[in-house]
Image (spheres, rainbow, N blue to C red):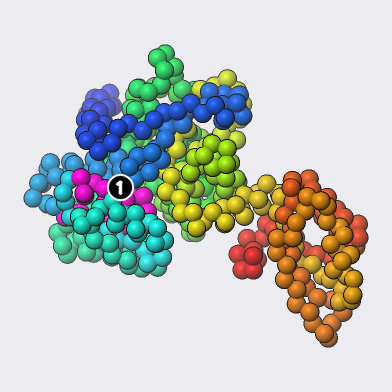
Amino acid sequence: MDSATESQEFLAGVDQARAALRELFEPTPLQRNDYLSAKYGADIWLKREDLTPVRSYKLRGASNAMRKALADRPERRRFVCASAGNHAQGMAYACAHFGTEGVIFMPVTTPKQKIDKTRHFGGPAVEIRLVGDYFDDTLSAARKFCAEADAMFLPPYDAADVIEGQATCGLEILDQLPPGVTPDLLVMPVGGGGLSAGMARIFAARSPATGLRFVEPMGGPSLKRALEAGKLVTLDKVDNFVDGAAVARIGDLNFGTLGTFPAEDVVVVPEDRLCGTMVEMLNIEGVVLEPAGALAIDALRDLGEISGKTIVAVVSGGNFDFERLPEVKERALRWEGKKKYFILRLPQRPGALREFLNLLGPDDDIARFEYLKKSARNFGSVLIGIESGSSASADAVRARMDAAGFTYIDITDDAVITSLIV
């Protein structure tokens, strides 16, 4: 089959998938964001996948794969998946819609909020099994059960029908843009690659002039590393903070599409900066985003000169557990330079602490203080956290500490130490 015919068949399949999705939910809105547009001097549009019934795009792929599996073998009514979050909720919703049975394997460490939401969407149609401390163990258990029960395994991203379902997001974008408007750039998050592979094929066929930018968290740049190596690679270590996009290896099928792009088209964003974007969108726009959902918006900072351009950013998910909000705010403050942590060497004599406190300005606050006095020593160690009104105020405190001759270690950016004691 030649490439043109293959492309047309893919477009036809995606169009059919889009029509079938209308039984589950209306197209998610494509909204021009005035705040971001003014901030970057560009025309910024947000594709609000956080507004699907399960608050992520995963429902698209899960429901399409289930629909086609039932059309192929209607007698097969049991489906299985392994997921710690959005894919599980998408499959649960699809099971309730199609009247099928679902067995969903989730790690034992999955937050209760995600388990409860999955159970809510699936109702009596799904059974949730908590297996393994790590996702690899969960996935292994799910596949073993699937083989023993002769059930249908529903992969989260590396399957043709899943890719086809996720690609419906691209068709909606192109149909929702104002007449005559062609986006200069499409910015989208990458986890396992199902969404980005489907969108890349849609835009190659329908809007080839649009440039594509893929966004990964710094703690899981599996596409970036694969493109740099010219082949699929498995990361030795993954930071799971951006749990919706932290994947050790891009899907094999997805890399067949994404492997043609240069590594420079992948933007890698630091997790602490991403937290700043999450807080910004919550405080200013009232938009609740999970870490993966904020990736494309955060990457706008790294696109170079975008003034005057039309840019579509995919907001991929809004399943945020508010129990994580203190951590997100903490990391955002550290990235902004407004919060610093020091291990301070303080003389053990009356008035020493007062001398240090006198160095603080009107916009500085003590956010953490732990002091261990040792009677056999002349100095004691203090763990101190200082929150300032601005990064300039924080820098001024440090300058005054230096001028006063205090001995200290700045541990703010030491991930190992802060993870243990902060």
Q: Nearer the viewer, residue 205 or 290?
A: 290
Q: Nearer the viewer, residue 132 or 120?
A: 120
On screen, residue 193 versus residue 236, left or right, reads left
The residue singled out by tag 1 in the image is 90
Coordinates of residue 171 in the picture (x, y in percent): 33, 27
Find the magenta span and give its range.
78-97
Q: Residue 257 falls in which quadrant of the image?
A: top left
Q: Is residue 89 magenta?
A: yes
Kind of residue indicated by mark 1: Gly
Q: Pointer 1: residues within 10 angstroms few (<14), some, or many (20+)?
A: many
Residue at 57% in and 57% down: 327
State which quarter of the image contains the C terminus: bottom right
Q: Is residue 318 visible?
A: yes
Q: Nearer the viewer, residue 314 or 205?
A: 314
Residue at 72% in and 71% down: 370
| Position of 385 relative to 216 (above/below) | below
On screen, residue 272 versus residue 123, left or right, reads right
Prevalent SS, magenta region: helix
Q: Nearer the viewer, residue 295 or 197?
A: 295
